[in-house]
Structures are given as C-alpha cells and as structure tokens.
Amino acid sequence: MTTHPDAGAATEEGTLYERLGGEKGVGVLIDRFYEKVIADPELAPFFAKASLVNLLKMQREFFAAALDGPQNYSGLALASAHAGRHISASNFSRYVTLLLDTLTEIGVKPRDIHAVVDRIAMYADDITGGGSIGG
C-alpha cells in the first residue's frame, strides 16, 4: 500500500487516525459508512457476493492504515482486488459522497473530513483502473 506524503506526520493533536478516535472511531466510521454503501442502489451490486464480516474487517484495516494508524493493511493490492469489477469514476464518486455524508454525521471536524477524503481519493486510479474521478 502506498502512503500519503504526509503519512505518519502527527500534529500536536495527533495523527488523523487518532483525531478520528483511533480503532473505535474508525470502527464506527466503517460500520455506518458501509450501512450506506450496502444500501445504495448504485454501489450495492459490487458487494452482493462479499462476506460482510470480511469486508468490514478489511475496510477497518485499510482505513486505519491509510489514516496513519498503527495497523498494516494485509489485503490484496487495491488494483488487484478491484480488477475486472468495472468500477467507474462515477461509482467511486458516489462512494466518496457517502463517505463525506458519514464523516459529517458522526461529527468529524471539516478539516479532518477533507483530509480523510484526500487520503481515500489517492487510491481512485487503483480502484477504477485509471482515469479521473470526475465521472
């Protein structure tokens, strides 16, 4: 997994992972976020055959690692994991919209919302197979 240029950089307030509440906060984020993702008519088909338990476990691990947490992401490389799934830039944009909604709902500060989205958007090409997230 590649890391963000600022990965590991902590402010006096802690890392982004810590500012989101550490393991517990990331767990809440992923649980609420994936409730939305799985219920979304555009995104649900991508997860129809997935084990929800495994999906949530891997997403907690991925987000924690991407947000400067102590965890390492042990899953497949993102490009490999998403290859052949035909995930469009529009699908990825919808995913990010639901992420924004969830971060706002759980009370994450605006600057941290932007930082989380920036981190996840770094992986758009790996998930969509290239191109921009503009649609």
Image (spheres, rainbow, N blue to C red):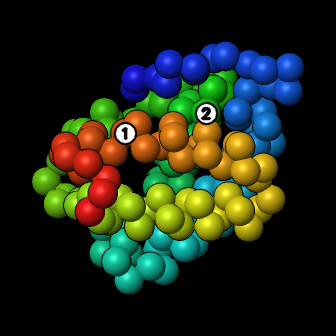
> Looking at the rendering, in which quadrant would you find the N terminus?
top left
Q: Position of residue 11 (x, y in %)?
A: 78, 20
Residue 77: image location, x then y, percent = 31, 33
Q: Is residue 130 visible?
A: yes
Q: Nearer the viewer, residue 110 or 55?
A: 110
Q: Residue 91 appears at what percent x and percent y?
A: 32, 65
Instruction: Tell me the number on the disc at residue 123.
Output: 1
Q: CA distance from mark 1 to mark 2?
A: 13 Å
In this view of the protein, which residue sits in the foreground, 49 or 132?
132
Q: Quadrant of the C terminus?
A: bottom left
Instruction: Give the left or right position of residue 54, taking residue 70 as reference.
Output: left
Disc 2, SS: loop
Amino acid type of disc 2?
A: Leu
Asked whether 108 or 132 is in front, the reply is 132
* Residue depicted at 65% across the width and 64% down the height: 102
The residue at the point 63 percent across, 17 percent down is 8
Q: Is residue 39 left or right of residue 69?
A: left
For disc 2, the marked residue is 67
Name the residue located 61 percent from the left edge and 33 percent from the top edge: 67
Does residue 63 sit above or below 11 in this rendering?
below
Across and down, in percent, residue 37 comes to 48, 70
Q: Secondary structure at mark 1?
A: loop
- Of the numbered discs 1 and 2, the one sitting upstream in the chain is 2
